[in-house]
Amino acid sequence: MLVLDLNMGGESSLDAIPQLRTEVPDTQIVVLTMQESPAFAQAALRAGAVGYVLKDAADTELMNAVVSAAEGRTYLNPELGAKLAAQPLESDSRPDSLSPRDVEVLELIALGHTNSEIAASLVLSVRTVESHRAHIQQKIGLTTRAELVGYAHERGS
């Protein structure tokens, strides 16, 4: 059993999950995090984690998640599970609805660039970048920069 913080040393440990699952396949991974984004939860579970617990609920949920993982069951914070269930199906809101420019902007957001840096890189105004970001958020139903980053990582951007 491994309880893994999603943000270790300022960087996401999301990328480490598949490697850990490959190197030590019998280890069950429960993510303990402050990331309340359904996109991060979905990405962690897809990467191979079997549990996802928010730090502010750890006192009541962590033991349940660990027991569930030990029994071969998945555990997801109930609030995040409800948000995931309420999201549109993937075919309704995924990359096919994003324009090529939207995808470029999303990739640069995922790499941690600011709106000004994205504007300079793509030879656009900052206002145009902000407009693309708003369109992306509307198209995929996410609201924060962290959710956009999680979504981009999830789709391989």
Image (cartoon, rainbow, N blue to C red):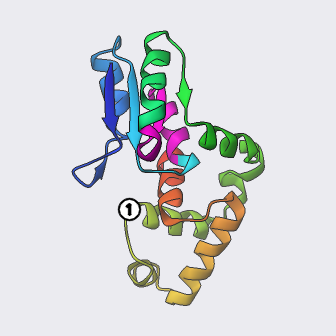
Residue at numbered disc 1? 111
Give the answer, above or below, for where 109 lies relative to 48: below
- In the picture, residue 58 is in which quadrant? top left
| Foreground of the two, 116 or 87 | 87
Residue closest to the far left: 9
Going 43% across and 12% down the picture, which residue do you hit?
Answer: 70
> Is 98 situated left or right of 40 in this image?
right
Secondary structure of residue under mark 1: loop
- The answer to whether 103 appears left or right of 47 in the picture is right
Q: Position of residue 149 (x, y in %)?
A: 47, 57
Residue 122, magenta (yes or no) = no
Residue segment shown in magenta:
40-58
Q: Would you call the spot at circle 1 few (<14 residues within 10 Å), some (14-19), or many (20 or more)?
A: few
Task: Tell me residue 44's x, y (percent).
Answer: 46, 37
Q: Quadrant of residue 89?
A: top right
At horizontal 55% and vertical 39% (from top left) the residue drawn is 42
